[in-house]
Image (spheres, helix red, strand yellow):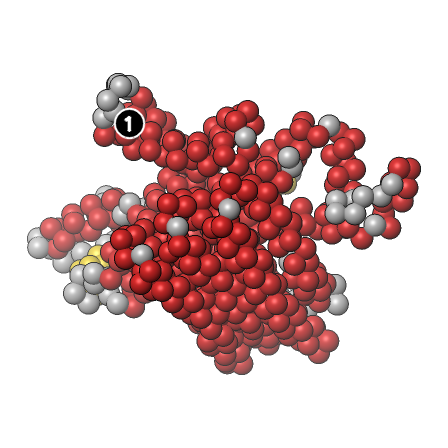
Amino acid sequence: MEELGKVSLTEFTLFGQVISVNLTTFVMTWVVMGLFLLLAWMATRKLSFIPGRIQNIFELIFDFLKDITVSTLGQKDGMKYYPFILTLFLFILLSNWIGIIPNIFKILGTFIAVIHSFFGDTVQITMQGLTGIVATVPETIWYSALINAPGIEEPTKSINTDLALAIMVFLAVQAYGIKNKGVVKYIRNFVDDPFPMKGPLIIFFFINPFFYLNLIGMVANVVSHSFRLFGNIFGGGMIIVIVSSLLNYFLVPVGLFAFFGLFAGLVQAFVFAMLAVTYIQQQQ
Amino acid sequence: MEFVKICAVLGSGFAMGLGAIGSAVGEGMIAMKAVQSLGRQPSASSKIVRIMVISQAVTETAAVFALVISLLLMFKSGDFSYIKGFTFLAAGIAVGFGSIGAGLGAGLPGSSAMEGIGKQPENSDVLTIQMIIGQAVTQTSTIFALTVALILIMLDPEPSNLKVFAILGAGFAMGFGAIGPGIGDGLVAKHANKAVARNPKHMGLLTRTMIIGQAITETTDIYAMVVSLILIFVV
């Protein structure tokens, strides 16, 4: 229980600087992207007028998000930003949902250990409650690596992923603002948003309190956008771990995974995408 | 060591006990309006129940944040200097008081959305989206509280009498500072939802105005966060 909230960091040196990387998140992000490509290939492999099962699901999601994006941003800009919003939604959704896949290697290793325990004393099997099986094996046995394999973790559980996504949205929003309004109007709008300063008075922008308010508001948007996703996914994962272990892994985790994994994951992915649409709309 | 553990469990109790207030009241308001709407439109029951569960899940976020900090503090152990105890206590206070406003506030748009769906079930899609955006922005205050609490938990300051009170002050600043903006944002979102229910065609304009209004309402929350960060790092 003491390891709660700790992340495993791998440190290496590059140009004399020590850089620490969360390797699990790194690998899991690539796994999610691979899964993403695989699903896309499966959905578009046999495109037909009467959609099959996977094509049907994807068309449902695509149409739903397209309707929302186009109705908020207008036909032209909506269609331009729709792929971006859709990618955000699908990536976050897959990232949130990948956590419900159990640690297959550990299950396989424990299974081998249980069979092995019938034939000798090298392996110790202890029961936790009714359903929890813990196998203690010496390091030298070949399947000990399987038992100690790291589990699957949601990439969105790490604040780095969420912050990167939020910064990406932030940059897209600013780019849209500059393109839509022009550089001069964008800067003017940023400097004195609710109360415009007349003509050349703009050079005294630093006495306008709204300049500082807009500046802080920008940072606050990125912080709240990323920490909303992080807090929900990280918190959900932690509640699952603690409540499951307190109840000896008996049946309750299924409901917890359904609520915090599937349902909250879907809602938070949708919230993230919708807020991105709203931030873009603000620059119109 | 013993002292740090005592402070951590006390902070854990503060976080969860106070953090449960807001979300519970908010979710109750949503369910109340859902029941009223069901009485008016029994034919739309599946829609009403589905959207009720979604909005309650979003409202629950504030309590989930409080639970996270509470669990993190509960199982904390190790070799810490005495000042670490005060940071744990301050983290619990920050997130505990900080989730009251957002939980209560997120319930307000949910309740008005349920009311709107009860009156006009065919507008439910537009209203759901508007409701989720309103609730998500309302939660900003509790997200700041969570951020400050996580910083406080990870912090390892130099022990001194001034620092002890600065850290406690940071917890109180963030905690109390987040109550008002949460409820205020919720009020804005509630009436924006009512307006969308009456006039779904103008949703774009209404959402934009709502977000600007909420951003200004949140300013006081940002002041609280800035003050607590100054208390943590500068004083």
Mark 1 belongs to which subunit? Answer: A
Q: Residue at x 40, y 57 (%)?
A: B114
Q: In terms of depth relative to the viewer, which is nearer, B25 or A114?
A: B25
Q: Position of residue A59 (x, y in %)?
A: 33, 29
B187 vs A79, nearest the viewer: B187
Q: Is residue A34 left or right of residue B231?
A: left
Decide if residue B219 is on the left or right side of residue A129: right
Residue B91 lies, in percent from the top left, at 56, 69
Helix, strand or loop for disc 1: helix
Q: Nearer the viewer, residue B20 or A33?
A: B20
Relative to B117, B168 lies left or right: right
Q: Give the vertical position of A69 relative to B189 (above or below).
A: above
Up-down relation of residue A57 to residue B199 (above or below): above
Which residue in the rendered view is the most extreme toward the left? Answer: A119
Give the camera-side residue of A141 and B114.
B114
The quadrant in which residue B23 appears is bottom left
Relative height, residue A224 to residue A84 (above, below): below
What residue is drawn where x is 33% and y is 55%? Answer: B48
In percent of width and height, residue A109 lies at 21, 47
In percent of width and height, residue B141 lies at: 58, 60
Residue A61 shows up from this direction? yes
The residue wearing badge 1 is A55
Q: How many marks?
A: 1
Please name the amino acid that badge 1 sits on: Gln
Task: Tell me the quadrant of the picture where the C terminus of chain B can be found.
Answer: bottom right
Snapshot quadrant of residue A239: bottom left
The quarter of the picture where residue B143 lies is: bottom right
